[in-house]
Amino acid sequence: MKAMSIIAAAVMAASVIALPALAQDAGTLKKIKDSGAVTMGVRESSGGLSFTVGDGKFAGFHVELCQHVLADIQKQLGMARLDVKYQPVTSQNRIPLMQNGTIDIECGSTTNNTARQKDVAFAVTTFVEEVRIATKANSGITSISQLNGRNVATTTGTTSVQLLRKHERATGVDFKEVFGKDHADSFLLLESGRADAFVMDAQILAGLIAKSKTPGDYKIVGEVLNVEPINIMMRKDDPAFKKAVDDSLIKLMKSGEIAKIYDKWFMQPIPPANVRIGLPASDATRAAWANPNDKPAEDYAKK
């Protein structure tokens, strides 16, 4: 009996030791290795971060960063070939599609906050955003207080209007929300006059304005509603994959290559219309590159 107990204890100990290994084997790296493919979640109209150029092709700052990351992972796994598939996602479905395994890495315009960290994981911050208001240049709107009685557009599944309502200068301001299914749809609400303002990340607003038929007809105005870290997103509880993604991004940050990639997408003419967004990297974005971290938006709000 004693000998049996020793054997049983040994088997149990071996099982406990094996559990982390099994968990790791079941992660995204193994999925990529076994399938020879990876699916990147991308956005169709997220400014210079992630957008479609037509014919099922996507581009942008975060798309290119993810291409670098996946090339490094391909080398790490010793794969001769890696099939990168692109899956368009929206603000509404990006987290469910990550959780159910439809996408493996999301390279769009997702804010890293504590609520979302309960469902997904985020890479080190690659872009820090300011939430602002876009309106028509002749609207007379220059601040939050002038939105009273107006229609304000935002994209379904984003937090922008919530931020607007919480702002101290929004006290007593009564406006009506109108929703676009994606950022391009929200901008169309502004363009067509169905909305008087569009609340969203400034770089997305700048990108949509730059690509519009008459960029001079629009302006970004008013108070900064929030400062948010925008991160590449992954599945939760997969430390091996997160480390691979972070290591690749940190390498780009330390070499200075990330600044060149940023300049390509925000300061130079970009497809499909060959227009320039003209949005230099902010001090907060450069600070994130200098000191890589995955702190949530709440940490930025404390500053």
Image (tube, rainbow, N blue to C red):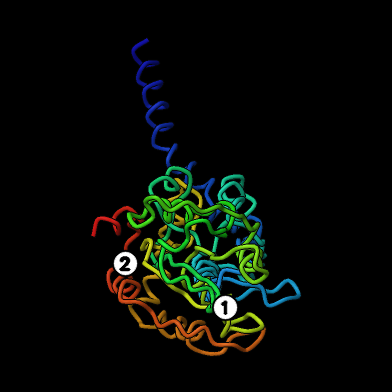
Q: Is residue 119 above or below residue 199?
A: above
Q: Earlier in the sequence, mark 1 or mark 2?
A: 1
Q: Which one is closest to the eye, mark 1 or mark 2? A: 1
CA–CA distance between discs 1 and 2? 31 Å
Classify residue 282 as left or right of residue 208: left
Look at 32% across and 69% down and name the residue there. Answer: 288
Q: Quadrant of the C terminus?
A: bottom left
Instruction: Please give the residue where the numbered disc 2 appears in the rendered image.
Output: 292
In this rendering, the count of numbered labels is 2
| Amino acid type, callout 2 | Pro
Between 295 and 197, which is closer to the camera in this rendering? 197
Residue lying at the far left of the rendered structure: 303
Q: Does residue 44 sit above or below 116 in this rendering?
A: below
Q: Are marks 1 and 2 in contact (CB under 8 Å)?
A: no
Residue at the spot 62% in from the left edge and 57% down from the top edge: 90
Crowding at mark 1 (Cα within 10 Å: few <14, some 14-19, many 20+): many
Q: Quadrant of residue 131?
A: bottom left
Q: Badge 2: how crowded within 10 Å, few (<14), some, or many (20+)?
A: some
At which x and y percent is residue 77?
53, 64
Farthest residue in the top direction?
Answer: 1
Residue 273: % across, % down = 66, 86
| Left or right of residue 4, residue 188 in this image | right
Classify 108 as above or below 121: below
- Residue 200: horizontal and vertical position, in percent? 50, 64
Q: Is residue 155 above or below residue 22?
A: below
- Amino acid bearing label 1: Ile
Numbered tag placed on residue 209 in the rendering: 1
Q: Which numbered tag is attached to residue 109? A: none
Q: Can the viewer see residue 255?
A: yes
